[in-house]
Amino acid sequence: MRLIIVSGRSGSGKSTALNVLEDNGFYCIDNLPAALMPELAERALLHTELLHPQVAISIDARNLPSQLQRFPELLAEVRAKHIQCDVLYLDADDETLLKRFSETRRRHPLTNDRRSLAEAIHDEELLLAPIIDNADLKIDTTHLNLYQLRDSLKLRLLNKPEPGTAFLIESFGFKRGMPVDADLVFDVRCLPNPYWKAELRDFSGQDQPVIEYLSAQPDVEDMFQDIHAYLSKWLPRFAASNRSYVTIAIGCTGGHHRSVYIADRLGRALREPLRNLQVRHRDLPHAKQ
């Protein structure tokens, strides 16, 4: 059996996550009381007609605070039944959540006559702290539209070819913000920038002219070898510590050239020893993943 627990602050994309999982064969339950998690898992194991049942549940701030505080022990009880269980936590920055509520005009579940929307958004994070601390995978949806969020969920949650740690190497541009859900971040902005070559500007780090230019730069080769050596040594130790998901972010200014080139090279070099490895380019439209 596989169980995915979806949580996050209101407006972060939990409904989208449940829809994606439902479309991919999961039996989904929204706003489950946290105390029912072990019983649900037990019933799914005993009474399902499926050989490998897949269940997804949403647990959020609509729960009683006392039940949210018990989340770590409830999660441990579920995992003691030898159930594959992933905790997904979605979030966005406060300004983005405020904007999303203003656009949809929906009421936040924690607002009342004495608590403003901004206060409710802040208080919600405090309530969900026990879940945040136990999340296997955190996704920052601040810069993701609906379709990008769906793609990200499919990539991280549904494309694990086998059990074990799932690694993601992600290129990004600092000008759009650093991914807050990254476990390791490497800054490659010190490398020669193809953007300042007029004949290369419109290409990306996946196009041959940029690949040839960067491959010929000694600093680029040194940076790649140093990052590769570090990851080759330490990522297996992340896996040995029973981490379910690890994200390695490679950043340059715009996320189009240097970071894309380095991320793709690392993906090719590390895919065989790590096996559960994927590459994503956050800020590159129409990237070849």
Image (cartoon, rainbow, N blue to C red):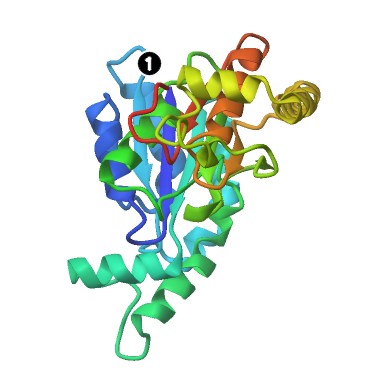
**Rendered location of residue 111, percent (x, y):** 32, 79
Q: Position of residue 124 (x, y in %)?
A: 45, 69
Left-right relation of 288 to 214: left
Vertical placement of residue 107 versus 213, above or below: below
Seen in the picture, residue 22 relative to 37 is either above or below; the reply is: above
According to the image, label 1 marks what residue?
Answer: 52
Q: Report if residue 239 is visible in the image.
A: yes
> In the rendered image, which quarter is residue 248 located in?
top right
Q: How many marks?
A: 1
Residue 11: quarter of image:
bottom left
Q: Give the camera-side residue of 119 and 275.
A: 275
| Residue at image coords 27%, 25% | 24
Report the amino acid beneath label 1: His
* Mark 1 crowdedness (10 Å alpha carbons): few <14, some 14-19, many ≥20: few
Residue 162 position within the rendered picture, expressed as x and y whole percent measured from the top left: 52, 14
Residue at 22 percent of width and 29 percent of height: 23
Q: Quadrant of residue 26?
A: top left
| Quarter of the image with the N terminus in it | top left
- Judged left or right of residue 260, residue 21 is left
171 or 92, which lies in front?
A: 171
| Residue projecting furthest to the top | 272
| Residue 167 visible within the image | no
Residue 161 vs residue 99, the one in the foreground: 99
Label 1 element class: loop
Image check: 101 left or right of 131? left
On screen, residue 153 versus residue 257, left or right, reads: left
Q: Residue at x 36, y 42 (%)?
A: 57
Position of the C terminus by quadrant? top left
Which residue reaches farthest bottom?
Answer: 114
Q: Residue at x 47, y 40 (%)?
A: 38
